[in-house]
């Protein structure tokens, strides 16, 4: 059995939850809430960076972040459902998934700017810099949406879109009809997407 330290609103924790479902190992994982802003939360001793998600093994081993956890779970499941083990296709999947995660990272930084700074301290230049990453990344996927598949690319995109829809750092839907259609198809194909959505 494993313990996953995360929150139900974390897009990266959601990646692990969906990946575990795809791999068929969800029942081996117990979710334990973590508060990254709480200095007394044991998360900071489990992961010195104080970041989620963080996977605790029974022997005391700690694994982080979402990428490493998903690779570990895939190996435990003796599967290649999320990511090929070798070859050029592995690196294609990794690159596209990293692009999706980079969009989510930039969106998070936009939200942190507003969350941790007073309005007069906020940097318009910094926000525009992060917005540019989001817009360029979305343009790449809009021009060439991925397969309707919950591999590492699909999972990363689903979780990124979930974060954009929840926090709304940018209005992504009006200018990306191909991605909107892709996300709706994925929701219909994979019930775990709706089951892991941010609680309302």
Image (spheres, rainbow, N blue to C red):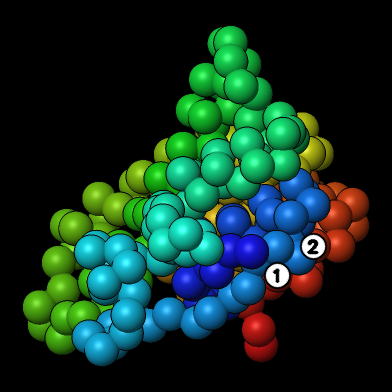
Above or below: residue 61 compared with residue 99: below
The residue that mark 2 highlights is: 192
Expressed as whole percent of the image width and height from the top left, the position of residue 77 reads 72, 41
Which residue is painted at 53% across and 68% down in the image?
Answer: 4
Expressed as whole percent of the image width and height from the top left, the position of residue 173 reads 63, 58
| Residue closest to the far left | 121
Secondary element at tag 2: helix
Residues at badges 2 and 1 in contact (C-beta under 8 Å)? yes
In the picture, measured across the screen, residue 67 lies left or right of residue 119, that is right
| Residue closest to the eye, 178 or 93 | 93
| Residue closest to the far front | 59
Q: Is residue 62 in sight in this rendering?
A: yes
Above or below: residue 28 compared with residue 98: below
| Residue closest to the eye, 35 or 98 | 35
In the picture, measured across the screen, residue 133 lies left or right of residue 27, that is left
| Residue closest to the eye, 4 or 136 | 4
């Amino acid at each position: 059995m494993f313990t996953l330290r995360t929150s139900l609103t974390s897009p990266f924790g959601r990646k692990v939850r969906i990946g575990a479902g795809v791999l068929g190992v969800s029942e081996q994982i117990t979710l334990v809430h973590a508060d990254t802003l709480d200095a007394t939360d044991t998360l900071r001793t489990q992961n010195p960076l104080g970041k989620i998600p963080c996977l605790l093994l029974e022997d005391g081993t700690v694994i982080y972040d979402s990428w490493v956890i998903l690779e570990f779970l895939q190996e435990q499941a003796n599967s290649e459902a999320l990511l090929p083990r070798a070859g050029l296709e592995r690196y294609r999947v990794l690159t596209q998934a990293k692009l999706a995660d980079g969009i989510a990272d930039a969106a998070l930084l936009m939200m942190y700017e507003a969350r941790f700074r007073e309005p007069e301290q906020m940097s318009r230049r910094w926000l525009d810099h992060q917005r540019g990453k989001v817009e360029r990344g979305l343009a790449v996927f809009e021009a060439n949406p991925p397969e309707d598949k919950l591999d590492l690319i699909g999972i990363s995109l689903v979780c990124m879109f979930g974060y954009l829809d929840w926090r709304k750092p940018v209005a992504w839907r009006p200018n990306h009809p191909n991605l909107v259609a892709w996300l709706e198809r994925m929701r219909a194909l994979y019930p775990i997407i709706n089951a892991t959505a941010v609680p309302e």
